[in-house]
Amino acid sequence: MSSTLFRTVPALRGAIRAPAARTAAAALASTSFVRGKATLPALSYDYGALEPYISGKIMELHHTKHHQTYVNGLNSALETIAEAESKGDFTKAASVAPLLNFHGGGHINHTLFWENLAPASRDGGGEPGGALKTAIDSDFGSFDSFCKQMNTALAGIQGSGWAWLVKDKSAGTLGLVTRANQDPVTGPYVPLMGIDAWEHAYYLQYENRKVEYFDAIWNVINWKTVAERYSKA
Amino acid sequence: MVNLASLWQYLALQAPLHSAMSTDALNLTQLGLTAYTLPALPYAYDALEPHISAQIMELHHSKHHQAYVTNLNAALQAHVTAVAAGDVAAQIALQQTIKFNGGGHINHSLFWKNLAPPGSKETRPEAAVGLVKAIEATWGSLEEFKRAFGASLLGIQGSGWGWLVKEGGNGGGLRIVTTKDQDPVVGGDVPVFGVDMWEHAYYLQYLNGKAAYVENIWKVINWATAGERFGGVVEEKNEL
């Protein structure tokens, strides 16, 4: 995993674990908790760096407004859970689950997304090589066929959601999955590469012509990042 | 909503249909079935400005709604073909496509009619005295209802709609419901008015500021239409 993701995900995990580790102390402590908070990761490229495939305006709003909202929502959900837990109010804690899933998923998904994109002038576009290419050829027939299947999956999403190239840890194979809204990829699947199919990801530039966005985004997929994720999956 | 009654009648009268046509796509209109069409808007694309821009309205109506209509008809045609072929697996496989695109068509058809140009008499709650009374009886005041409705809209995770519905059955009460993606309000509840919370409904104008869209939508809600639906004067199926 690249450095940006490594920086945020442990903070997220720490925040999720913190309440459990702190249960005994909670009886003594007041309602002020010290723990990790999710933060908005910096992009490793400029907002305009993915043009002309994704406009600078889209990138800026997507990162500073949408992703920031998920970060805030995640921290707020975690706070509510921690407070509820400290009072033994597990009903209240459980009621936050949808918000935790939505905002936590939104934070995880966008963090992965920024990293599996890169300017076309740098690591973006082209085709994967090495073991990842071998696996894609084996599991999808060819890179071209994989792209087509991914685009079909993206176009078939009804509403907001994501499509992901994943490694199935139990089967050892690559696969394609879609997720509704901000549901994160979990279970036996390790997310290798994701494409955001929410309208906010493309509408200012492509309007209703989402197929054009799905075609264009291949020019800025960072296969180096995807290969690194694959090698560690 | 999907009226297949005439198809069943047709099939009953056409015994050879199964073998003769099982491999060919059937044409909805040839069978005397409804092929849905994009309804004209009851106002110009720029009529809801400044609250909803003409660009949003034109794309929303001529592109998004049209796509739901086109895909609904294609799905229904495939479904008719599958019924004629006795292919129940294919019929089942089409259900979600019919729900999504049929829902998209129903929802947008209702939405256009429950909007009206700002400042018009239809946008005044006084145009729906009985409905407003019922709202006040349920939520305490119109303002309190608007607050609750807005909170429901802003709580939608992903794409979806917020609706004021009159529950089915005698003396059905008013209720705020949200539906995901293009799920329609069906099954007895009467949609009084709906607000589209898909990003395509506001993003070109409001960007990520959807709270402002939710606030401004009240200036273009057509209370006259809402009152008619509440009073049972118009029925959803007659609006399509």
Image (cartoon, rainbow, N blue to C red):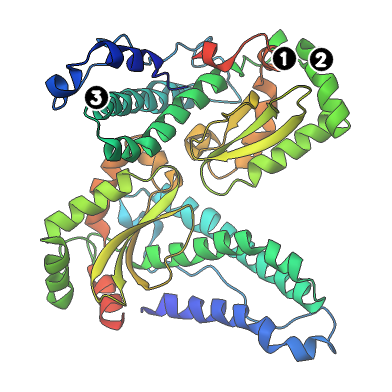
Q: Is residue B30 left or right of residue A137?
A: right
At 38% from the left edge and 16% from the top edge, which residue is drawn?
Answer: B36
Q: Amino acid at mark 2?
A: Gly
Is A188 left, or right, of B143 in this rendering?
left
Quickly name the residue at label 3.
Answer: B84
What crowding class fits label 2: few (fewer than 14 Cα within 10 Å), some (14-19), or many (20 or more)? some
**Label 1 sits on residue:** B227
Q: Residue at x 12, y 72 (%)?
A: A134
Residue B147: x and y, percent? 77, 37
In the structure shown, which secondary structural element does the residue marked by tag 3 occupy? helix
**Vertical arrangement, residue A43 with respect to residue A28, above or below:** above
**Gap between marks 1 and 2, in whole Å?**
7 Å
Q: Are marks 1 and 2 in contact (CB under 8 Å)?
A: yes
Judging from the image, mark 2 belongs to the subunit labelled B
Q: Secondary structure at mark 1?
A: helix
The reply to the same-chain question for discs 1 and 2 is: yes
Amino acid tagged 3: Ala
Q: Residue B130: which disc?
A: 2
Residue A166 in sight here: yes
Q: Chain of mark 1?
A: B
